[in-house]
Image: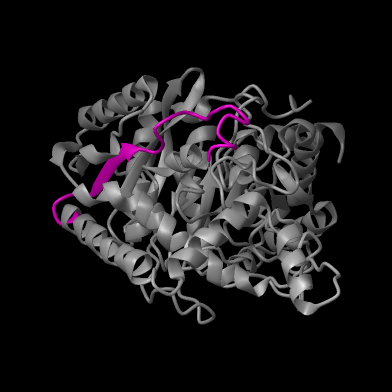
Amino acid sequence: MNGVADFRARELLDLTAHEQAAALRAGEVTARGLAEASIARVRAQEPVLNAYITLMDDEALAMADAADERLRAGNAAPLAGIPIGVKDLLSTRGVKTTAASNMLRDFTPIVDCTVVTKLREAGAVFIGKTNLDEFAMGSSTEHSKFGVTHNPWDLDRVPGGSSGGSAATVAAGGVPLSLGTDTGGSIRQPAACCGIVGLKPTYGRVSRFGVIAFASSLEQVGPFARDAEDAALLLSAIAGLDPLDSTTAPVPVPDYAAMLGRGLDGLRVGVPREFFVDGMEPGVREAVERAIDVFAANGAIIDRDVSLPSVAAALPVYYIIAPSEASANLARYDGVKYGYHADADTMWEEMELTRGQGFGDEVKRRIMLGTYALSTGYYDAYYLKAQKVRTVIRREFAAAFASHDLLLTPTAPTVAFRLGEKVGDPVAMYLNDLCTIPANISGNPAVSIPCGFSEGMPVGLQLVGGMFEEGTLFRAADAYGAVAGWKAQRPPIYGERGR
């Protein structure tokens, strides 16, 4: 690239994905130029952020060249040439997919997961595989074999988790879009911590085929972005029925873009009291209350007399169901077929050493919790009872959406906490997901959007929608974002200031 074109690519990297797409189609920049600028920025930031486990420079440039050919031919999809980060839990053909674990540190899949296949077909450009809590078990991205990820707003704080790398690189301007997974808040909580948009789709909206499994009945793949329009663009590309995943729903994917620009007028918004929990930081509560006022001032019909009494049980329900499913899913890692293997004299010793050395402490903790809950004599008392309470929670959400278009809550009770502050206290760490877990238990879609600052750190506002009503969430998030203007705020570690 020449100097002028190189500058233009760096400048365009600060735009949203849909703005970059327009520039690519107008010939203002090439996909290769955009990819080169993204790679350079990410590499400048990595020494302080550690948002990636594997960078894919050669693959990214090859994908960018292919996107340029499509753009010249005039048959490119909306995401053609757009740089994207991919959580290292999503199988990517020919590229290490580690789940941030010693167990899979050298694992290279021979097939793509469905969402990666769809993005390849759309012409997206993969910049790299992003860091996470090991096997997506955590709320801070401190449980990673490959080191902690830092928050771009304050390098001494966590970016949230488990999809912390995906959130941090978008917030820092390395890429405009990234993919995460959300089992109990692992997209929304880091989105809140990093001041960006993060959506957990309805369970069954996006294929999980090829995603390294943690808790199969809870997790969904979803987008990180700087605004609602970009999140809608990415969800449109990855959503839909997949014959390789029987849990995907035969529900048509609507035109999400058509929901944008409709404003907040007439939206029926419930504010359930149970989400304003004890211990919520005053600054978080104040920011959320101001956001509610903005919704009301712009025509939304606010109902504060909403109650979902059983969501108080969502956290214990989650920490029975999720570890139980993790215990079953992670039983496959025995050192025999693939993954880490430890040598010993007998098969049983090899298996014990493999699992003991391959898994980190948090993963071991959850496997043991789940194995206990599923064991003879305890299954009915714990797992079966948790599933019954889950049904009650689902019914309460369904009842709330019979008279409301969306529910409005805090995303997390606190802003991003300091590195090391909670890593030694699992219960304190688990409490970070109090407000996000209920939507995973019920299966409803939910999005976190920026709504202000407390202690100089971003605060997230969570919008929960009816089943398969992501379009309503995009409408509300887009309208609020246009009024609030938080997208223009940049963290100290942004762009070329990555050193």
| Quadrant position of residue 105 | bottom right
Question: Magenta segment: does it hold 418?
Answer: yes
The image shows residue 437, relative to residue 411, as above or below, that is below
Which residue is painted at 38% across and 43% down in the image?
434
Work out whether residue 8 or residue 294 is closer to the camera in this orientation and state it: 294
Q: Is residue 20 left or right of residue 497?
A: left
Give the image's coloring scheme. Answer: one colour
Residue 123: image x %, image y %? 66, 61
* Image quarter in which the N terminus is found: top right
Question: Magenta segment: does it hold 109?
Answer: no
Mark yes or no: residue 79 visible.
Answer: no
Work out whether residue 361 or residue 167 is closer to the camera in this orientation and state it: 361
The image shows residue 104, relative to residue 6, as above or below, that is below
Work out whether residue 184 or residue 10 is closer to the camera in this orientation and state it: 184
Mark yes or no: residue 69 visible.
Answer: yes
Residue 60: image x %, image y %? 78, 55
Q: Please, what is the dominant secondary structure of the magenta stretch?
A: loop
Q: Is residue 349 left or right of residue 243?
A: right
The image shows residue 113, relative to residue 319, as above or below, that is below
Residue stretch rendered in magenta on the structure: 401-425
Which residue is painted at 81% across and 54% down in the image?
61
Residue 96: image x %, image y %? 78, 61
* Image quarter in which the C terminus is found: top right
Residue lying at the far top of the rendered structure: 455
Work out whether residue 29 or residue 64 is closer to the camera in this orientation and state it: 64
